[in-house]
Each structure stands twice: as structure tokens, then as C-alpha cells.
């Protein structure tokens, strides 16, 4: 995402579980290596004995399939929100910039978004499709495998109004760094915001986000709204 014009709207969107109905990386690991192997790594991560970065490295090493094989699994078992492309088009029409930010593999995410006609830059980790096990090359040295919050803070410092849209644990810091946040219903980010009294708007699909952001007077007018960082979760 290029430096924002002062006052411009910069929208950052997580991919797995936010644009998709499931975490597609987890789905690939479980489909190839089995639930037990995936769960063993997840237990270590949730017990805070390893970082998300380390978990992703270990899980990637369990996946030794080709890119077309990965696409075949995802096309049969995962769903990309078909309203995301319309959301992006509407955002662009309103002068907003949209970027997808993920700790997952860019070479899996970009083709999926291209298939639904979503024209957005993707900031994610690179993957080598090694038959002995996938190898991730991370964007930075952060514990989450991608410092999404740093991208949000950079846009805010450049004068943009920032929006973060996510669902999970790796979205916590980026969501807190944004002026406005949307959290997928029933997921970890929504619970995190609610438990801390942090303002966020819950959503199920991106047509709801589009309506709230671009077809709602509450979003743009001054006063209590999702732009008010002290507003309640709804």
C-alpha cells in the first residue's frame, strides 16, 4: 500500500477466517498431515511455548504438496466471501485504499482473490512448494510472522484514517492500532474486543462491512460511531 494522502481511508484486511470461512492454511495442514499433527503444534502455540511464527514454520513443513494440489483442496473445502470483491470496488470508488495482510502464504492467497475479481495488493509471506515440506520466507522478524500492526501504524502516521478488519489472534495488535475495527462474528477478535471494552463492529460478510462503511451516515458523521474509539461493541 502506497503512502496515504492526509485524511485518506486506508483499509487493512486479514485473509484467513476473515475473507474466507475457515483458516485455509490450517485446513491444508490438517488435510495433508492429519488433525493430530496439527493439534500437537497448536497446543504448543496456545500454551505460549512457541510463537505463531514458529508454529507456522512447523506446520508448513508438514505440507509437501504442489500448488495445484493445494488449490484443489481449498476449492473443495473452503469458501472465499463472494461479496469481498464488491466491497473492494466500492472502497476504491470512495477513494479508499485496501490491502490484504496475512501471515499465510502469498502464493496461495493471491490466486484465490484473483478468481473472485478482487483487485488488491497482498502483503503475506512467501512459500516454496517443496515436496519435502513447504518452506516459508517471512516478511519480517515479528513473532506473528508478519507485523500487521506496523502497517496500520505507518498509515496512521502518514495521516490516513485506518480501518482494520480481522478475526483472529494475529489480528489483535493491528486492530488496536487502527482508528476503526471490524471483527468477524463468533471469532477470537470479536471476543478480545468485547472483553476489553474496545470499540468494534461485528460482521458476517463483507456486504455488511460495505453497508456500514459506505452506505451509513453513522460512519462518516461526527459523534459516537464505529469511528469513536470509545464506542461499544455491536
Image (spheres, grey):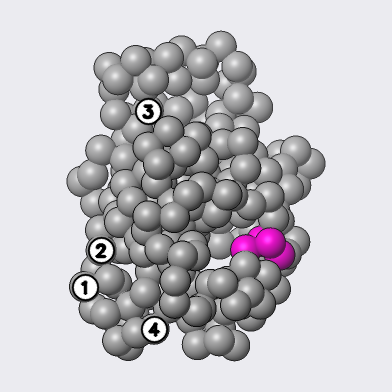
Query: Which residue position is annotated with label 2?
Result: 153
In the shown orientation, is residue 51 left or right of residue 163? left
Secondary structure mainly formed by the magenta segment: helix
How far apart in space, not on screen, are marks 1 and 3 (Cα)? 31 Å
Q: Which residue is mark 4?
A: 8
Quick check: 36 left or right of 60?
right
Front residue of 48/172: it is 172
In primary-sequence order, the first of circles 2 and 3 is 3
Q: Closer to the N terminus: mark 3 or mark 4?
A: 4
Asked whether the residues under the numbered discs 1 and 2 touch, taking CB atoms below 8 Å apart as contact, a structural biologist would say yes
Is 6 drawn above or below residue 20 in the view shown?
below
Q: Is residue 207 magenta?
A: yes
Q: What is the span of residues highlighted in magenta in the rendered image?
A: 206-210
Q: CA distance from mark 3 to mark 4?
A: 36 Å
SS at mark 4 in the image: loop
Residue at 49% across, 72% down: 98
Quadrant hosting residue 25 = top right
- From this view, report whether residue 209 is shown above or below residue 216: above
Checking the image for residue 157, the label placed there is 1
Residue identifier under label 3: 55
Vertical position of residue 50 compared to residue 57: above or below: above
Query: Pointers 2 and 4 in contact (CB under 8 A)?
Result: no
**Element under label 2?**
helix
Amino acid at each position: 500500500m502506497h503512502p496515504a494522502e492526509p485524511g485518506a481511508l486506508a483499509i487493512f484486511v486479514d485473509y484467513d477466517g476473515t475473507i474466507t470461512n475457515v483458516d485455509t492454511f490450517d485446513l491444508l495442514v490438517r488435510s495433508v498431515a492429519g488433525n493430530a499433527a496439527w493439534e500437537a503444534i497448536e497446543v504448543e502455540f496456545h500454551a505460549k511455548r512457541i510463537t505463531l511464527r514458529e508454529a507456522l514454520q512447523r506446520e508448513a513443513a508438514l505440507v509437501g504438496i504442489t500448488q495445484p494440489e493445494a488449490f484443489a483442496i481449498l476449492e473443495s473445502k473452503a469458501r472465499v466471501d463472494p461479496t469481498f470483491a464488491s466491497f473492494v470496488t466500492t472502497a476504491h470508488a470512495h477513494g479508499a485504499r485496501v490491502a490484504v495482510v496475512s501471515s499465510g502464504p502469498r502464493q496461495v492467497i493471491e490466486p484465490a482473490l484473483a478468481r473472485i475479481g478482487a483487485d488488491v495488493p497482498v502483503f503475506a509471506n512467501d512459500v516454496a512448494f517443496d515436496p519435502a515440506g513447504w518452506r516459508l520466507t517471512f516478511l519480517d522478524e515479528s513473532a506473528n510472522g508478519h507485523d500487521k500492526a506496523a502497517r496500520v501504524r505507518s498509515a496512521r502516521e502518514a495521516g490516513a484514517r485506518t480501518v482494520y478488519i480481522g478475526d483472529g489472534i494475529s489480528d489483535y495488535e493491528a486492530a488496536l492500532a487502527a482508528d476503526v475495527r471490524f471483527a468477524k462474528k463468533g471469532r477470537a477478535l470479536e471476543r478480545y474486543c468485547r472483553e476489553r471494552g474496545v470499540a468494534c463492529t461485528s460482521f458476517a460478510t463483507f456486504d455488511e462491512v460495505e453497508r456500514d462503511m459506505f452506505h451509513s451516515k453513522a460512519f462518516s458523521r461526527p459523534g459516537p460511531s464505529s469511528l469513536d474509539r470509545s464506542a461499544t461493541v455491536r
